[in-house]
Amino acid sequence: MKKIVQKYSKFLKQTSEQFNTAARKNGVKCARGCHECCATGFFDITLLDALHIRDRLKNIPAPVRKRVIAKANEQLDILEKKGAFSRKDPLLKTLASIDSISRRSVKMRCPALDDRGACLIYDQRPHICRIFGPTVRGPRRAVRLEGCGYFTRDIPETDFPILLNYSDEEAMLKAMFVKAGRKRVREVDTIIPAAIALDLEKWL
């Protein structure tokens, strides 16, 4: 499993480089200091993202790591009291469960944000955090990845082949589940606080 996580970490780094190159070419970037997408509730991330984050937390300075983990646990406590999340079953298995956690966490910020809105685990952040922002469009203006709405310009798929990117991610997800003894990719996700606070490999 460690080799798969290491391969995924390299994939994330390459994704960031490709996306940033495409963004610069098309003159699009996030507004300085903006962290709205990180401060309005939790979106879903894959279990491979979760394993990557958990593995890479060891590279974070101890005081920062303790702070981020403590905040994640505090948020999970709140969500459990609301009946919106369970440490005993931390997987999101349906679109309804993803929508529910998003709605019920809407006033929460990512546990990795500092007081100024900067990401404390920026180099370890999940896949979606690396590619979200401007809309990525394919042929005939087809939306491949919906942006945040702040951007007035898009990234054409010819500059950032999002479908190929997703395909590469899917292959690594399959390898992860096969390694865990599954026969196919499971349609399950989780949230960033769980990825930070819990060892989710046992739920594969």
Image (spheres, grey):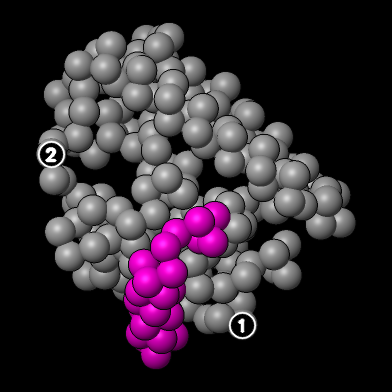
Q: Are marks 1 and 2 in contact (CB under 8 Å)?
A: no
Residue 63 in view, yes or no = yes
Query: Where is residue 42 drawn, in percent x and y?
Result: 36, 62
Quadrant of the drawing holding the C terminus: bottom right
- Tell which residue pokes out farthest to the bottom in this image: 81
In the displayed structure, does residue 81 sit left or right of residue 168? left
Q: Which residues are magenta?
A: 56-84
Q: Magenta-highlighted stretch: main secondary structure?
A: helix
Query: Where is residue 96 drawn, in percent x and y?
Result: 47, 62
Q: Amino acid at mark 2?
A: Arg
123 within the magenta span: no
75 within the magenta span: yes
Q: Residue at x 22, y 70 (%)?
A: 107
Residue 204, above or below 133: below
Q: Residue at x 13, y 36 (%)?
A: 31
Residue 36, above or below 160: below
Residue carrying label 1: 88
Q: Residues within 10 Å of mark 2 (few under 14, many from 20)?
A: few
Residue carrying label 2: 32
